[in-house]
Amino acid sequence: MFRVKTFLITGILLFLLNGCGGISYIGYDQSQLLLQLDQNQLRLHGRVIGEKRDNFSTLFLSRKLIRMDDGTLIVYENAHTDLSYEFEPMITRIIKIIFEAKSVATIYTRNNLFAYQVLLKNNKILNVLAQQSDTQGLRLIYGMKTSQLNKMLRQLDPDAPGAYYQQGIQLLDTNQALLTKWDVRKVHLVPLVVPIGRFMGPF
């Protein structure tokens, strides 16, 4: 019953937001990975085969390893801050830090939906889709082949450009699929999250 209510609430929120225009969403519920950009929705069926949760006191993180119907693996991550905190500005900086990346290439951005190709320390390319509607939440998926990423983008936006690098890695080993490196130092000392109002300056 709780899952049904959650799914209905998600649907209602998306319906209401549609009237406002210019929205994006990434989420997972009821064995469905849901992506939305403006009026276009993409639903992909897959089951969770592993999950990890972390509590950094000012930031709460859920990571789900999903086996899609075509057999591929995708990781869905949902990070949100404590009510008194928010992410530091610049989502691209956050992506670079949590993947400990050499560089991050922005492939696409529209209405707070971002597509990246991340150059990892091992010189491999990781495809990432990220979404951030406000300063207190961050959702992302990664592990798609480049052809899969391009297909997703063009289903959401027919005018979306193709990714630069075609050799994006595909996740194969379930034991090494969680590629983000969240830790206490990054969250509190880098920092990834700060008290709300820090960037507003003194009154």
Image (cartoon, rainbow, N blue to C red):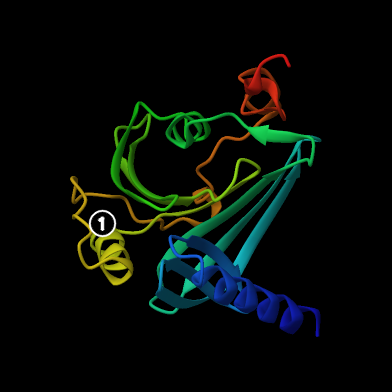
| Left or right of residue 143, residue 15 in this image | right
| Residue named by callout 1 | 146
Residue closest to the far front: 203
| Left or right of residue 90, residue 121 in this image | left
Residue 44 vertical position relative to residue 50 in the rendered view, above or below: below
On the image, the x and y values in percent for residue 182 come to 61, 35
- Nearest the viewer among 108 and 19 is 19
Dot 1 crowding, Cα within 10 Å, few <14, some 14–19, many 20+: many
Quadrant location of the N terminus in the rendered image: bottom right
| Left or right of residue 66, residue 110 in this image | left
Residue 24 vertical position relative to residue 194 in the rendered view, above or below: below
- Nearest the viewer among 193 and 65 is 193
On the image, the x and y values in percent for residue 186 come to 62, 25
Q: SS for tag 1?
A: helix
- Nearest the viewer among 181 and 117 is 117
Q: Residue at x 26, y 67 (%)?
A: 151
Q: Residue at x 59, y 46 (%)?
A: 134
Residue closest to the far top: 202
Q: Residue at x 45, y 68 (%)?
A: 36
Quadrant location of the C terminus in the rendered image: top right
On the image, the x and y values in percent for residue 19 come to 51, 72
Q: Residue at x 43, y 60 (%)?
A: 22
Count of numbered badges drawn on the protein: 1
On the image, the x and y values in percent for residue 141 come to 47, 55
Residue 118 vertical position relative to residue 167 in the rendered view, above or below: above
